[in-house]
Image (cartoon, rainbow, N blue to C red):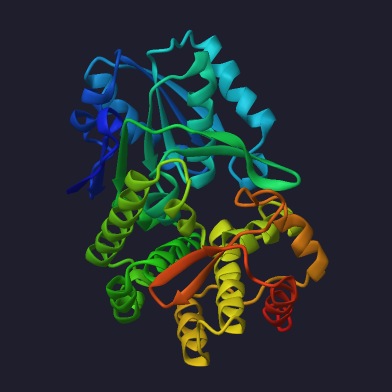
């Protein structure tokens, strides 16, 4: 096991990464305010891992309430959120009861937002079970639900007390979900960690083959990058926005085709290529750079072109992005491989061109 720390002063918390961690109640107990927890999971993850997490806690004298939700991005909404509140109230949970989110990114976002709201805030713990959640969404305190007009439009910054990433859970992840998680891993190399990108170019096939050592390395290095950025800019006033490479385009894809049709990581991959193409049009990346990014994403089995939405529809949906400021669209682009920048100076004509060029062969 390797333990990282997200440094936020009194709200700092550990990120444990390793194998066979679900049964480690000793890692969870110090973060509980009372000996009662509500474990929120879904119909896919609960049959596999809920009892492995719950039973050691029960043996340690912890009262466990189990809440199982339907699985899928389309359930990241008000109705499902309210069903969590119904269960917490029926289970007589209190402000000091800890909510544990056991699942992927959708479940973690939902559970975290529920914890932020219930009785004005209850402690929560992230136990991510997908690659995307382990390397990205479980760390940093972003919680939210979707709105038909935009992804993650309704939410809160609310930090967990602990992140427990058991890499053994990745063995049951379907290939499509594993590949989707790689999009977020590759992102860290592109925006700020060139040596990590070079490591990924060498070791990508090991990750696809689910080599335990390679997966642990990728999760740790990704979490270290995320923790450093969040510690410097918790509420996305500046540097943290760079973590959204490909996301403005990607969120438009997810909303445009309907939540759940494209996985988040798939949309981010196609969005990353749109951002790279725009960076090329601005003169920052050359054609070899574009080919390098495209080749790595393709090796990961990820899409490099977006769906054939109308370009104006892309732009309409992108205007709902949370980085829009004073009505101006701000985009995360690449000044070079390994260095991202947030800019509002990209001419709209070139934004349109980049979108069109990365949807032409979808």
Whole-percent x, y for residue 320 in the image: 71, 50
Q: Residue at x 53, y 31 (%)?
A: 113
Left or right? Give the position of 207 relative to 353: left
Whole-percent x, y for residue 353 in the image: 72, 79
Q: Work out which residue is located at the far bottom of the displayed protein and give it.
A: 288
Q: Nearer the viewer, residue 164 or 241?
A: 241
Left or right? Give the position of 172 relative to 318: left
Tell me the quadrant of the picture where the C terminus can be found: bottom right
Q: Residue at x 44, y 66 (%)?
A: 187
Q: Compared to 80, does 14 lie above or below? A: below
Whole-percent x, y for residue 139 in the image: 38, 44
Whole-percent x, y for residue 33 in the image: 29, 16
Q: Nearer the viewer, residue 345 or 313?
A: 345
Residue 52 visible to the viewer: yes
Q: Residue at x 32, y 44 (%)?
A: 231
Left or right? Give the position of 30 relative to 251: left
Q: Nearer the viewer, residue 6 or 241?
A: 241
């Amino acid at each position: 096991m390797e333990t990282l720390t997200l440094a936020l002063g009194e709200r700092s918390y550990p990120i444990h990464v390793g194998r066979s961690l679900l049964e480690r109640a000793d890692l969870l107990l110090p973060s509980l305010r009372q000996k009662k927890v509500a474990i929120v999971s879904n119909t896919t993850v609960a049959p596999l891992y809920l009892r492995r997490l719950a039973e050691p806690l029960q043996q340690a004298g912890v009262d466990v309430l189990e809440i199982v939700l339907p699985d899928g991005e389309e359930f990241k909404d008000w109705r499902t959120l309210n069903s969590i509140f119904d269960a917490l109230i029926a289970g007589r949970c209190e402000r000091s009861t800890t909510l544990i989110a056991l699942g992927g990114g959708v479940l973690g976002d939902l559970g975290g937002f529920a914890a932020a709201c219930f009785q004005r805030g209850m402690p929560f713990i992230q136990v991510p079970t997908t690659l995307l959640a382990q390397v990205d969404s479980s760390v940093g305190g972003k919680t939210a639900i979707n709105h038909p007009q935009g992804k993650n439009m309704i939410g809160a910054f609310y930090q967990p007390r602990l992140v427990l990433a058991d890499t053994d859970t990745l063995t049951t992840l379907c290939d499509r979900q594993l590949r989707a998680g790689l999009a977020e891993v590759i992102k860290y190399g592109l925006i700020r960690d060139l040596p990590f990108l070079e490591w990924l170019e060498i070791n990508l096939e090991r990750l696809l083959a689910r080599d335990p050592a390679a997966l642990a390395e990728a999760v740790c290095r990704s979490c270290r990058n995320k923790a450093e950025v969040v510690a410097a800019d918790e509420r996305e006033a500046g540097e943290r926005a760079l973590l959204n490479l490909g996301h403005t385009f990607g969120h438009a894809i997810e909303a445009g085709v309907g939540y759940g049709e494209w996985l988040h990581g798939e949309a981010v991959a196609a969005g990353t290529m749109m951002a790279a193409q725009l960076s090329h049009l601005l003169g920052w990346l050359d054609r070899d750079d574009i080919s390098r990014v495209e080749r790595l994403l393709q090796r990961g089995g990820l899409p490099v072109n977006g769906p054939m939405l109308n370009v104006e529809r892309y732009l309409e949906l992108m205007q709902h992005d949370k980085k829009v400021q004073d009505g101006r669209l701000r985009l995360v682009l690449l000044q070079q491989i390994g260095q991202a920048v947030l800019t509002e100076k990209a001419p709209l004509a070139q934004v349109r061109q980049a979108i069109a060029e990365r949807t032409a062969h979808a």
